Image (spheres, rainbow, N blue to C red):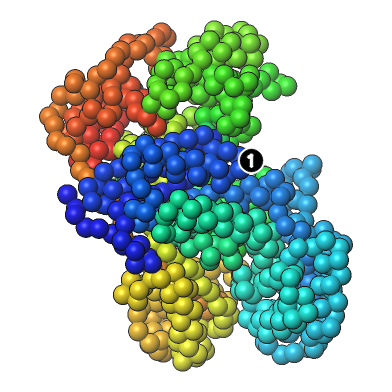
Amino acid sequence: MNDTVMTTPHGRAGRYRIGIDIGGTFTDVVVVDQQTGDLRLAKVPSVPKDPAAGFLDGLDKALSRHGIAAGDIAFVGHGTTVATNTIIEGRGARVGLITSEGFSDVLEIAYQTRPDLFDLMYEKPRPLVPRRWTVGVPERIGPDGAELIALDTDACVAAARALQQAGVEVVVIAFLHSYRFPVNENAAAAAIRAVLPDLAVVTSSGVCPEYREYQRTSTAVVNALLLPHVGSYVGRLTEALAQRGAAVGVHLMTSSGGVMSAPVAARFPVQLIESGPAAMALGAAYVAQRAGYPNSVVFDMGGTTAKVALVTNGTPRVTEQFEVGAMAVASDTAGRGRGYPVRTPSVEMVEIGAGGGSIAAIDPGGALGVGPESAGADPGPACYNQGGEEPTIVDANLVLGRLNPDFFLGGEKSLDLARARRAIEERIARPLGATVEEAALAIVEIAVARMAGALHMVTVRRGIDPRGFILVACGGGGPLHAAAIARRAGMSKVLIPTAPGLTSALGLLATDLRHDLVRNTMVRAESADPAGIDAIFTELQALGEQLLAEQAVSRDRMRMWRIAEMCYAGQAFQLRIPLPDGPVTGDVLAGLAQRFHEAHKAAYGFASEGEPTMLMALRLTSQGEIERPTLRPLAKGGIDATDAIKSERRVRLHGAPHLVACPVYDRTRLLAGNVIAGPAVIEQMDTTTLLPPDARATVDPGGNLIIELGAH
């Protein structure tokens, strides 16, 4: 037992740490009692039209169910889809753009590449700023910092005034080469604010000081779009916490896997776009590392989508760019051009439309498909009995006996088996000439194949053998399909966390405050000035310390990591090379170049040590350490798990021609050391685990299920 009473980043004593994650279908709440290590859970339906209401519903339910006073809260972490949904649904602010004269079409031109070379029907996403709200003004700074055309501040003010009169709420300023020389952007912003103080102004160099004009401009525009909506959202949450008597604010998960305070998040909402998925990856990585598995593939299946991420040495992979939009993907390369590029660090993952609510349908060619359309939380799958009539993956699993209609969400909701059967029969089985059970099995098999394909993308397509990793199954639907997916990928082990459906919420409590800062240098490494490089890192460190200090992080809890982005002269993309602590000297830069050659060979199979290298950018990650939750170990038991059996149910399994009798275990009654042989079903409040034949599950000391798959 841990008798330590935790303090918040603001120094206030508190007992309970709370993580609240809003998904497309459910809002998950995890409460950790820091005095006992107990984990307490709550789950409520999400409210898509008012996400703050879902947050508060979940918080209130957790507090009342477990008898917790709001004044005893030490920390609140939050993962949200508000930023993403604001863009997808077109509910962002009206944004105007001021650019260098002659470059007003930067958003219209976008990329010159297609996401699919042979897609003749491809259309670029509509620019987030209409062309009529984009204005060029006289100014130009060259790539070497020389002033080519003086900035006309009167033209900037006139453009901003015209945009405001046209209904624009936020103005973005994006000038050429401002990633290195932001003086003109800053001067233009100051001039506009002095004359139009009620008009919000965003500079591209203040949001994304990186080269590549389109990506930088797009990132700044996305940030501007989100400012009013996200600002009011986090403000409402902060106010609601205070009204309930909580002495802490809310910390929001960023796309990169850190958390930031509400005031900082309100200034940089673009960093929240992949908030929820990042929390999932962090939570799963945390659980797997505690269980002794630093290398894992995280698989999360929620109600709307399925996501897969790769974790090595306990850390999820991070990409420097992704796209957001209705057809976008969270990657800097796959399908580029389907959405709007965002140049901020993000946990790298593949996401597909294969959640529990994904709809199964017959296409015009007579083939069965599953997703990406989803029934969502409203009306939901047919079996929810809320007006939904389309068959979904949840309906299929219910028909196959894999779900208990009377124990959904721990018995809080009943599922209508008759409606599920009717939906599958009318829309799938009858058109295919199959039985209802055959159609349901086909729906699940197609979904499994699609999810295994996503796993293939983050491993095999990147030259990584998944057989050396453990599959961590999260989300309400993950444990139900994990064994089948692992088997398709050739993996032999699966880890089911104690609360798989609430892993994202737990991830909010297993991370630190984090800020990623960057300065472009674009110089030959061989001729770089060590003192100049050192000065840039000193400046970045001071800024990182300032941001953490604003969030009441003490200096002894601040950590800084320095990274150089390098490439060979003429290359378009860089590798990240860590720098050692201490002053930057000539020897440090020489060692940096050698480590780049080694990293290039590891990544691409060759190195050209005779070629000159470029020091493209310097990055600093400032991290404010937050106490991790201390969870209570599970009580020990023997191998025999018979006492946890609560019933028996007939289940249709893969490859079986008929229903098979399976024991049903109550997971809350399992003890550390218990072993369960398949086939079996293991039920708990937030999910159901399906254990196939020739598989064995062992309960580890942390309460996780470690599934070992036999030869198949």
The location of residue 300, given as percent across then percent down, is: 45, 39
Q: Between residue 506 and residue 177, name the one nearer to us.
A: 506
| Residue at position x 62%, y 74% in the image | 206
- 627, above or below 367, in the image: below
> Quick check: 644 left or right of 484?
left
> Quick check: 641 left or right of 156?
left
Q: Quarter of the image holding residue 513?
A: bottom left
**SS label for mark 1:** loop
| Residue at position x 33%, y 39% in the image | 66
Q: Between residue 531 and residue 101, name the one nearer to us.
A: 101
> Quick check: 522 left or right of 672?
right
The location of residue 204, given as percent across then percent down, is: 67, 71
- 296, above or below 598, in the image: above
The location of residue 278, given as percent across then percent down, is: 47, 52
Q: Between residue 587 and residue 517, name the one nearer to us.
A: 517
Tell me the amino acid under the disc marked 1: Lys
Q: Residues within 10 Å of mark 1 (few under 14, many from 20)?
A: few
- 209, above or below 678, in the image: below
Which quarter shows the C terminus?
A: top left
- 390, above or below 496, in the image: above
Q: Between residue 380 and residue 704, name the one nearer to us.
A: 380
| Residue at position x 15%, y 24% in the image | 640
Q: Mark 1 sits on what residue? A: 49
Residue 119 in view here: yes
Total marks placed = 1
